[in-house]
Image (spheres, helix red, strand yellow):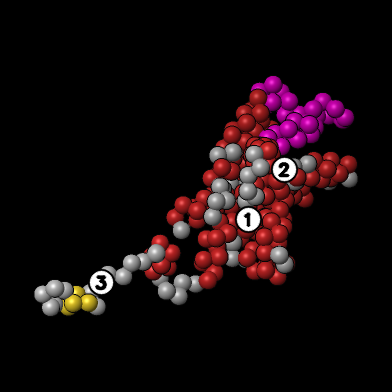
Amino acid sequence: MKKAPGGEATFKKEEKSPEKENEEALGEGAPVGDELDEETLEGEEFSELIKYTLPGYIIGLLAGIFLDWQGYQRSPLGQGYQRSPLGQWLVRTLAGEGESIFEGIYSVKQRFRKAEGTMAEAYGWGKLFGLAIPWFIDLGSRLAGVDVYGIQGFYIPYFYALSDQIGANISGLLFLKKREGSWNAAFARYFRHPVMLASLAVITLVPLGLLGARFLGFSPTTQTYTALETIAANLCWVPPVVGWYVEKYR
């Protein structure tokens, strides 16, 4: 406080630094967890991953329709007519993992650009590395005599749709371990990270839906049905959408 020339007391306005204004805008005593989540999500570019999902769905569905139209939903090999495993491999790969190819390309581009490592990039690498796992599961199941079109084969579309998601979840956890420096801190951040929690929910809930559909009588008797089943199970778009929402509105 100082006196003006006329003798009246005036108050000098305190100048605030940008950091001080930001602290007041957030409010005193803001939860530390919220601040940590915002720091974790800052610049993670999940919006880049969302745009790759729809093209994968469309390409997989068009492949299924085309193969059915060409009469390749069944293969005249062996006794009688059996559903074409090669056609199903192609359709499930495109419908369930098409976006993984694009996301993997995104991660490769980030490395060539020497961009700062983000969770989105780690997510893309994990999905790329998980791409081939369902091929071996599918082949091994058929060789073992599993009815991959019945109830017992419900896990086949699950792995086509979400093996890349499992890889992304593991890759995201490893990214947090690298950032935090210890497993305890990484798991603590993991269970506060909305993208990782959304990914975990998708991984655990989708097989229940597939099992229920097969139990109610659904079977991928055509390549189009194969594509639709895989698309329905492929909820890999959910975690990036959660990440994009938090980036945009928090």
Q: Which mark is in front, 2 or 1?
A: 2
**Position in image of residue 122 (x %, y %):** 67, 50
Q: Is residue 234 left or right of residue 160?
A: left
Residue bounds of the magenta highlight: 67-95
Mark yes or no: residue 63 visible: yes
Q: Mark 2 — residue?
A: 128
Residue 83: say if magenta.
yes
Q: Mark 1 — residue?
A: 199
Q: Say which residue appears at 39% left-offset and 69% top-offset.
A: 24
Q: Nearer the viewer, residue 146 or 123?
A: 123
Label 3 to label 2: alpha-carbon separation: 60 Å
Q: Please, is residue 138 above or below residue 172 in the view?
A: above
Q: Do the residues bearing badges 1 and 3 touch, measured as CB atoms within 8 Å? A: no
Secondary structure type for disc 3: loop
Q: Mark 3 — residue?
A: 12
> Callout 1, which amino acid?
Ser
Secondary structure type for disc 2: helix
